[in-house]
Amino acid sequence: MRAVSFQRLALALLLAVLAQPGAAASEVNLYSSRQEKLIKPLLEEFTKKTGIKVNLVTGKDDAIIKRLETEAANSPADVLFTADAGRLHRAQALGLLQPIQSQSLEEAVPAAYRDPSGHWFGLSLRARPIMYVKDKVDPATLSTYEALAEPQWKGRICIRSSDNIYNQSLVASMIATQGVEKTEEWARGFVANFARRPTGGDRDQIKAAAAGQCDIAIANTYYLAGMLNSEDAAEREAAERLAVFWPNQNGRGTHVNVSGAGVTRSAKNKDNAVRLLEFLASDEAQRWYAEVNHEYPVKPGVAWSDTLKAWGEFKADSVNVAKLGERNADAVRLMDRAGWK
Ligand SMILES: [Fe+2]
């Protein structure tokens, strides 16, 4: 008799806890621009380890930020996960994120790859080097992004349009190190060397170079890695015609960016949100996540995939990626003035 009523009491308590809207001890709501298949297995691992259920909402990068902005304080989201420091900075500037302190995140994520005030943390690293057609370009003639403005590259460069945030962040990184004036002068020469009016995404630049439309493509490495590992033989063949050149190795280093996450201002499951971020920065999650996305782990010492190993080690720009967001508006205006379509 007594045992039964105790069980009933326990059940009533459990139901009371579960009934609390949005604040259940055992869940976290994630808004992610990462495709479900590229993150779900990790989230399942997190749930297995912690008992915290992850409710995943996926959408396009800019759309999920817009959604968070519209929902404001009523948003169920606890964590925003998106690509590019420029976007993470924008979410922060819109007041959508809150600063968090976590020793394990600060130890795992190098200072250059997170917001200095803790609003967001890089969780994977993407590099945007020079890619060249192997039978057309002698890599000894390559050196820096800056040198791609020289006349020898006239009509030989493919790169996507200036409305793309990856290029905005690349230009922002140059503004951060050498100022607007010098960067603008560079951009005019660089644009004059384009083989065609910018069109398509990063993959399309690689394909255009492989097809003979240009000798140089600027693209994020994971696109090339994705093509090299593609099930489509034509994609593999196209990618194999190109090689990676790491620019600016004797100076500031190759431009890098992050995908990353922050805890939302509206978070009702803040502790769980921090635990999720900490898990995503763990060795195990770093290795898996970087490998399926063909990106680099942010955490030093975590093993790289074979594709990345084949391109070798490189010196990455050490400018804090938060600067890419801070200089984004300057970059957008500069590219427009330089005629970068
Ligand atoms: Fe991308």
Image (cartoon, rainbow, N blue to C red):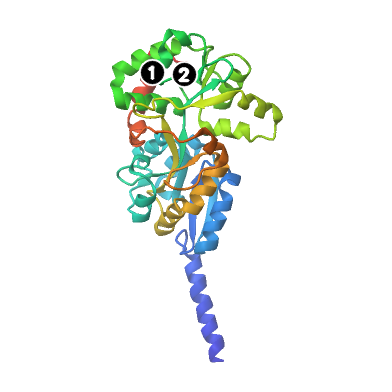
Q: Is residue 201 visible?
A: no
On the rendered structure, is 315 left or right of 59?
Answer: left
Does residue 241 lie above or below 195 as drawn? below
| Residue 265, position as x, y percentages in the image | 37, 48
Q: Secondary structure at mark 1?
A: helix
Q: Nearer the viewer, residue 79 or 43?
A: 43
Q: Is residue 72 visible?
A: yes
Seen at 43% across and 33% down, the residue is 314
| Residue 197, position as x, y percentages in the image | 52, 13
Q: Secondary structure at mark 2?
A: helix
Nearer the viewer's eye, disc 2 or disc 1? 2
Q: Residues within 10 Å of mark 2 (few under 14, many from 20)?
A: few
Indicate if the residue with disc 1 has its beta carbon within 8 Å of ligand 1: no
Give the number of the disc on residue 140. 2
| Residue 43, position as x, y percentages in the image | 54, 54
**Amino acid identity at mark 1:** Glu
**Amino acid identity at mark 2:** Ala
Seen at 33% across and 47% down, the residue is 118
On the rendered structure, is 114 left or right of 4?
Answer: left
Give the number of the disc on residue 146. 1
Does residue 296 lie above or below 218 as drawn? below
Seen at 63% across and 17% down, the residue is 211
Q: Nearer the viewer, residue 300 or 320?
A: 300
